[in-house]
Image (cartoon, helix red, strand yellow):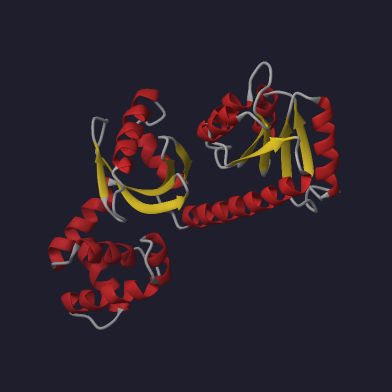
């Protein structure tokens, strides 16, 4: 079966040849393409060449165990969104906890019950594909969005978010630690949707808006760069807009449709329309086309 006909690519990581052979055969029969590795380092080497859709990871292995391998996978933006299911011994509850803390999405006990395994794989592949689809849509719309775990790690970043983060030297471990520490502390206080954090002690001002929880233990955030903030502030002052109205008007001036604005600001298209009603009055116009023209004319003059 070619990979184009496959239900997905699964990497099985286990130091026991018998277990590898059994899982390889069972998964191929289910229609999956299977890659195998016998320790964590081999798994990392494979993911550098090809990204599997899901990883079945043995917890305890020589050379590099599953916990360390999973942590390294999650630190790499190219592999951070791959779901990892840990395989542990029946009485090994400590490994279950450690595996989830390392970034695993689920665990399954050995000896493995294949029906249970197939059901869990189906669920996590479906969830991962939905997440990737959402990420792709945000990236295509040019959104400076990223996901951040409750444990304090950046999981995924859009292309625009990467550019903004690179402008504050986020690649440097010291800067990354400062930013992640402030984000983690902020999230422990359960910020309200759309609330704003100003990140301090870095090379240039950086603001982060909270968009909501994208999945358990994972939060969707958006970077607000200086240009966007200054334009919104200017529009708000010129037309006496509220903070929320200025956000809607900003994206209106960028040529976004109501549906796109709703996706960007995580609200319904109906709510966008409700915000536009007072905006039209304040701008002394009757429709969104005229509002866009007024905003662009003003922005071209400043």
Residue 3: give x, y in percent of width and height: 79, 47
Residue 121, visible in the rendered structure? yes
Residue 8, visible in the rendered structure? no
- In this rendering, is residue 68 above or below 154? above
Residue 84: give x, y in percent of width and height: 62, 38
- In this rendering, is residue 291 above or below 219? below
At 64% from the left and 53% from the top, the residue drawn is: 123
Q: Is 226 displayed left or right of 75 in the figure?
A: left
**Nearer to me, 264 or 219:** 219
At 82% from the left and 26% from the top, the residue drawn is: 17
Quarter of the image where one finds residue 177 = top left
Quarter of the image where one finds residue 69 = top right
Q: Is 62 displayed left or right of 19 in the figure?
A: left
- In this rendering, is residue 280 above or below 247? below
Q: Is 124 displayed left or right of 176 in the figure?
A: right
- In this rendering, is residue 84 above or below 232? above
């Amino acid at each position: 079966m070619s990979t184009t006909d496959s239900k997905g690519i699964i990497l099985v990581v286990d130091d026991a040849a018998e277990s590898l052979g059994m899982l390889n055969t069972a998964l191929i029969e289910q229609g999956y393409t299977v890659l195998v590795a016998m320790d964590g380092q081999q798994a990392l080497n494979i993911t550098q060449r090809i990204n599997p859709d899901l990883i079945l990871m043995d917890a305890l292995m020589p050379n590099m165990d599953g916990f360390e391998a999973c942590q390294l996978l999650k630190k790499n933006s190219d592999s951070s969104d791959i779901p990892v299911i840990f395989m542990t011994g029946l009485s090994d509850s400590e490994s279950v906890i450690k595996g989830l803390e390392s970034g695993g999405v689920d665990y399954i006990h050995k000896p493995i019950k294949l029906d249970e395994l197939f059901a869990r794989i189906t669920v996590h592949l479906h969830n991962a594909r939905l997440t990737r689809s959402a990420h792709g849509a945000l990236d295509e719309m040019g959104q400076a969005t990223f996901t951040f775990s409750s444990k304090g790690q950046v999981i995924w970043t859009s292309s625009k978010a990467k550019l903004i983060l690179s402008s504050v030297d986020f690649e440097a471990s010291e800067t990354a630690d400062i930013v992640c520490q402030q984000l983690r502390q902020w999230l422990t206080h359960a910020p309200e949707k759309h609330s704003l954090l100003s990140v301090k002690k870095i090379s240039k001002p950086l603001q982060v808006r909270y968009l909501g929880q994208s999945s358990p233990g994972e939060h969707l955030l958006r970077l607000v760069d200086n240009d966007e903030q200054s334009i919104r502030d200017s529009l708000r002052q010129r037309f006496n807009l509220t903070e929320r109205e200025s956000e809607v008007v900003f994206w209106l001036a960028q040529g976004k449709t109501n549906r796109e604005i709703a996706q960007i600001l995580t609200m319904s298209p109906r709510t966008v329309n409700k915000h536009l009603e007072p905006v039209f009055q304040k701008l002394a116009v009757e429709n969104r086309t005229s509002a866009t023209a007024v905003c662009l004319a003003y922005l071209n003059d400043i």
